[in-house]
Amino acid sequence: MTNKEGQKKNVSSSLWSDIAKSEDNGETSNNPTNNKQTGKKTAMKIIGKKVSNDCKLKADKISMKKSVFCLSNVSKCHRNDVMAYLTDNGIHVVSCYPVLKQLNKMAPASTADVNNNNNSQTENKKTDEEESSTFRVCIDSSDSKKMKDPDIMPQHIIVREWQFNKKPETIVDQTKKDG
């Protein structure tokens, strides 16, 4: 292959440089490991949509895409009140949990309670039954627009997407590979 000046052009080096440029620009390339940070291949998942009543092949579980929101600045109420309000407004609620301050969670426990496994179950039930002013609400993703609609939410209630904690990155020790 020759360019305009009549000089030979190295085909393989130009192709690899084009791929490297496309990776830098964030474009999709032919490289199967596009996720450079984790080094894992991302598998493609397809979920069927065809509805057939006479087919013997059926899904065992119904998968649903979920969205998680934080509902805050709510006057103290029970999670059932929040779920009832959202359901009445056509929002399919998967789960709703009160968000309690760290001070409430860090209450001192007696030594007898520390060794008792049933204590954690009892604490979870108490947490679910407490009144709160902030809630973690998981809904069907198709209802996200309704959740973000200011005409549906009561005045001065704050709705935002839930911010999940980032997992710490693990660093591979290079000395293990050498030895």
Image (cartoon, rainbow, N blue to C red):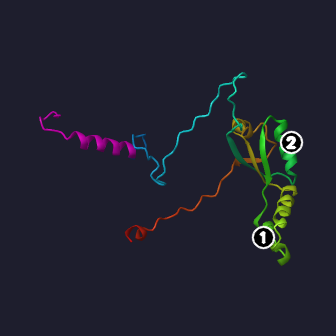
Mark 2: which secondary structure? helix
Looking at the rendering, in which quadrant would you find the N terminus? top left
Is 75 on the left or on the right of 12, as rendered? right
Q: Residues at badges 2 and 1 in contact (C-beta under 8 Å)?
A: no
**Location of residue 11 in the rendering, given as x and y in whole percent from the top left corner:** 22, 39
For the record, the magenta segment spans 1-23
Q: Residue at x 81, y 71 (%)?
A: 107
Left or right position of 6 against 37: left
- Horizontal and vertical percent position of residue 94: 77, 43
**In the image, residue 135 above or below residue 51:** below
Residue 27's mark? none
Q: Nearer the viewer, residue 128 or 152?
A: 128
Instruction: Kindly identify the residue that appears in the image at 37 percent across and 69 percent down.
Output: 178
3D distance between C-alphas at marks 2 and 1 = 30 Å
Residue position for label 2? 84
- Determine which quarter of the picture holds residue 179: bottom left
Going by the numbered disc 2, the residue's amino acid type is Ala
Q: Residues within 10 Å of mark 2 (few under 14, many from 20)?
A: few
Q: What residue lies at 14% left-to-right and 38% top-to-bottom?
A: 8
The residue beneath circle 1 is 106
- The earlier-in-sequence mark between 2 and 1 is 2
Q: Is residue 9 magenta?
A: yes
Looking at the picture, how far across and down is residue 29, in whole percent?
40, 40
The quadrant in which residue 155 appears is top right
User: Which class describes the residues within 10 Å of circle 1: few (<14), some (14-19), or many (20+)?
Assistant: few
Name the residue nearer the viewer: 32 or 53. Answer: 53
Where is residue 19? Give x, y as percent.
Answer: 34, 42
> For the view shown, which residue lies furthest in the bottom direction?
111
* Residue type at the position of mark 1: Met
Res. 30 image quadrant: top left
